[in-house]
Amino acid sequence: MIPTPAATSASSRSHGSVSSLTGIMELEDAGGIEILSDTLRDPGSTEEEKSEAAGLLAQVTSPWIENNSSIEGLTRHLSQLVESLTGRGRGKL
């Protein structure tokens, strides 16, 4: 799938918004980990939406963000996230 200019722009904006600890905290406050988990598990989500969710999850859990030792909601949704991402890697979801 070739992303549209609008999708590319939205992706850039969302990735930029969580590239700092403040952005990650805002994502947590909005229930972002649950939203990402739901998006990855939802059969109605598009491939583009699932790719964006996986990318955001990778970004907020990346080790290069200083002072980011804990992400609220990650533990609670971890098994669902692992299952969804593993399925995506195997082409099943």
Image (cartoon, grey):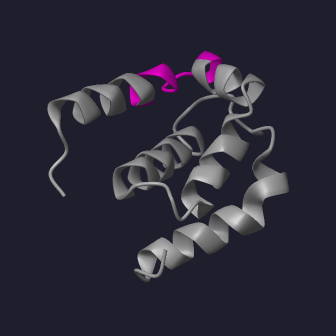
Question: Could you tell me residue 14's position as x and y percent?
Answer: 43, 27
* 1 lies above or below 5: below
Q: Residue furthest top?
A: 22
Question: Could you tell me residue 49's position as x and y percent?
Answer: 42, 48
One can see residue 75 in this view = yes
Image: magenta residue range: 15-22
- Magenta region's main secondary structure? helix
Which residue occupies 48% across, 55% down? Answer: 45
* 73 lies above or below 83: above
Which residue occupies 58% across, 60% down? Answer: 42
Q: Residue furthest right?
A: 76
Left or right of residue 61: residue 46: left
Left or right of residue 26: residue 76: right
Left or right of residue 85: residue 26: right
Q: Residue furthest front?
A: 44
Camera-side residue: 3 or 43?
Answer: 43
One can see residue 62 in this view = no
Q: Quadrant of residue 83?
A: bottom right
Which residue occupies 59% across, 69% down? Answer: 84
